[in-house]
Image (cartoon, rainbow, N blue to C red):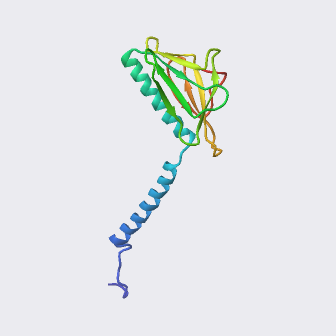
Amino acid sequence: MRGGVIPRPAFTLMEVLVVLLILGLMAGGAATIHWGRASPEREAGRLMRWILRSLTKANRTGRSFTLRLSTGTSTDTLALRWRDDPNVETFPAAPGFRFQLVRHGFFAPESVYSPQWGTFTPAATLRITAPQGAKPHYLILSGYGRVRTALSPPPGGVE
C-alpha cells in the first residue's frame, strides 16, 4: 500500500454481467420491434418463396402452371393453376397489402411457366404496396424463368 490508497478493481464481475444483461435486453427489444413489422419487402420475399416452391414442383413433376395476375386495379390474392388440374392454389396477401400488375406483355394477364423450357411467358412485374405509405417493392418474373425482388421495376419494361 503506497500513500494510504487501497487499490480496487475497476468493475466487479457482477457489475459487468448486469450491464451486459441490460444491453442484451435493449438490443432484443429493438430487434423484435423491427422484425415484427410488416413491410412490402417482407411480403415480396414471402411471395417469391411461394413462387419458387411452385417452380421446384413444376421442374420435379414436369407440369406447367399458370399464374393469374390481376390487371388494372390492385388485388390481395394471386392464383396459380396447374396443367391438368382444375383446382386453383391462391396466395393471399398479408392484411393491408396489395399486388398490382405494372408491366406485362401484350397477352392475357397471366404468365405460364414451362418446365421444359424453363421460361415464363410472358414475363411480368408485380408491385407490392401497403396502405401505411411504405415505399412499394417489386417482384419480377423474368422471361428466363427467374424470380427476384427489387426496390424498383426493371428499366424499359419486363426482362
Give the quadrant of the C terminus. Answer: top right
Q: Which residue is drawn at the image coordinates 57% and 32% (left, top)?
A: 150
Which residue lies at the image location 48% right of the left edge and 36% below the top edge? 46
Residue 74 percent coordinates (x, y): 64, 32
In the image, is 135 to the left or to the right of 38? right
x 50%, y 22%: residue: 146
Outermost residue, bottom side? 4
Instruction: Residue at 63%, 46% (x, y): give it.
Output: 132
- Give the total of numbered labels: 0
Q: Is residue 109 left or right of residue 18?
A: right
Residue 129: horizontal and vertical position, in percent? 61, 38
Query: Is the residue 109 above or below the residue 94 in the image?
Result: above
Indicate left or right for 25 with 44 as reference: left
Of residues 132 and 149, the one nearer the viewer is 132
Vertical relation: 100 (above or below) 24: above
Q: Residue furthest top?
A: 116
Residue 73 lies in quadrant: top right
Residue 71, compared with residue 83, is above or below; it is below
Residue 140: image x %, image y %? 56, 26
**For the N terminus, which image quadrant?**
bottom left
84 left or right, relative to 77 = left
Q: Position of residue 149 (x, y in %)?
A: 54, 31
